[in-house]
Amino acid sequence: MPSQVSTSDTKKNFDIFRPIIEVGVIESDDYIVLGNLPAFRARYGILIHPTVALLRRPPKFKLSTDEVESVFWISLSEFLEKPVHSMYPVDKFYMVHMFEFEEYPLTYGITALLCIIMAIGVLEKHPNFSLMSNLTVTDMKEKKLNSLDIIRHVYEFSSRKFENSKI
């Protein structure tokens, strides 16, 4: 019996993977594209489509320079550890996270936040630092928040417009 794919299914699948195609990430033996995190609107109006892949070894991408500034290979667990992490408050809830790895470029802002979110979701671990002023290490432990609760909280508050900051 031949398989049937409806037009709506085909369009849905294309819409999911269009951001992957635009940046030049195509599946290979080195990695398997799993899909995208929910689209995320950064504070300055930029719409970000984070792509998630399972990597077997450092990938060799042929990236679109119009879409991608840089690519780096760092273990997800590094984004939950304090030694290379620092942060500073920007507004009532929002904190800018920074990671200063020795052999990699400074990773900060929305890139760092998305790496933290991915690490929380994949590893199902809490970071050993506060994520926002209203989501501290103590909050996460006392409220017994799971990974999904933490990610929802971050998505809810980090896309809000600044209230008091001049940034």
Image: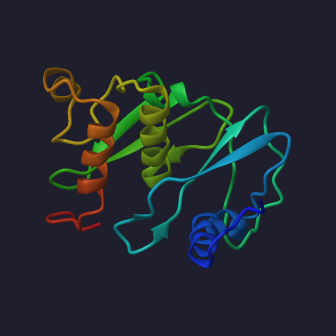
Decide: is 11 above or below 60. below
Relative image position of residue 149 (x, y in whole percent)? 26, 39
Position of 12 compared to 89: left or right?
right
Relative image position of residue 158 (x, y in whole percent)? 29, 55
The residue lying at 44 percent from left, 27 percent from top is 80
The front one of 5 and 129 is: 5
Relative image position of residue 90 (x, y in whole percent)? 25, 54
Decide: is 34 above or below 167. above
Q: How many marks overall?
A: 0
Decide: is 19 above or below 144. below
The residue lying at 25 percent from left, 55 percent from top is 156
Position of 59 compared to 122: left or right?
right
The quadrant in which the C terminus is found is: bottom left
Position of 2 compared to 70: left or right?
right
Query: How is the model colour-coded?
Result: rainbow
The residue lying at 58 percent from left, 65 percent from top is 16
Relative image position of residue 126 (x, y in whole percent)? 35, 26
The quadrant in which the N terminus is found is: bottom right
Q: Quadrant of residue 163?
A: bottom left
Residue lying at the far bottom of the rendered structure: 7
The front one of 92 and 6 is: 6
The residue lying at 16 percent from left, 29 percent from top is 139
Position of 154 compared to 98: left or right?
left
